[in-house]
Amino acid sequence: IWKRPIYYGKKFQSSLFVTSPDFSVSPCMPLPVLSYNLFRAKRVAQLWSDLGLHVLPTVIWANMETFDICFDGLPKKSFLAIR
């Protein structure tokens, strides 16, 4: 999905909703790697939204120290997919 987000986004266009991709987040990951995976998920979600897809943001966190960064930039008072 990361290498061909538009290709896959077009395949999902008949779906009512899609969730943003879930790139791994683990407590043993260095913070820059964790941040990069969160960036990738949010970037693909934005590209899919630009294609007209209704994207439900997916949230995953590694531990309490990563909780805030994982929710950063997500819409307030809306539905989220928790994994």
Image: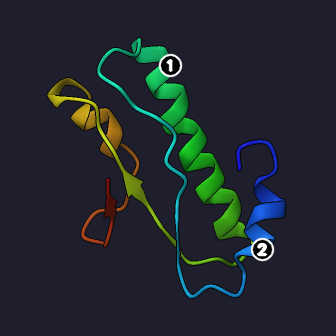
Q: Is residue 3 left or right of residue 78?
A: right
Residue shown at 69% from the left, 78% from the top: 52
Quarter of the rendering containing residue 30: top left
Count of marks, rendered view: 2
Locate residue 72, reporting x and y percent: 35, 42
According to the picture, the residue beneath numbered tag 2 turns out to be 11
Q: Is residue 28 left or right of residue 52?
A: left
> Relative to 69, does residue 54 appear above or below in the rendering?
below
Locate residue 69, reporting x and y percent: 32, 33
According to the picture, the residue beneath numbered tag 1 turns out to be 33
Q: Is residue 65 left or right of residue 19?
A: left
Q: 2 or 74: which is nearer to us?
A: 2
Residue shown at 48% from the left, 37% from the top: 38
Secondary element at image label 1 = helix
**The disc labelled 1 sits on which kind of residue?**
Val
Secondary element at image label 2 = helix
Q: Residue furthest left?
A: 64
What is the C-alpha distance between the residues marked 1 and 2? 28 Å
Neighbours of disc 2 within 10 Å: few (<14), some (14-19), many (20+): few
Q: Nearer the viewer, mark 1 or mark 2?
A: 2
**The disc labelled 2 sits on which kind of residue?**
Lys
Locate residue 40, reporting x and y percent: 60, 39
Residue shown at 52% from the left, 59% from the top: 20
Residue shown at 64% from the left, 77% from the top: 53
Q: 50 or 24: which is nearer to us?
A: 24
> Relative to 51, does residue 39 appear above or below in the rendering?
above
Quarter of the rendering containing residue 58: bottom left
Q: Which is more N-terminal, label 2 or label 1?
A: 2
Q: 35 or 7: which is nearer to us?
A: 7
Quarter of the rendering containing residue 61: top left
Locate residue 35, reporting x and y percent: 47, 27
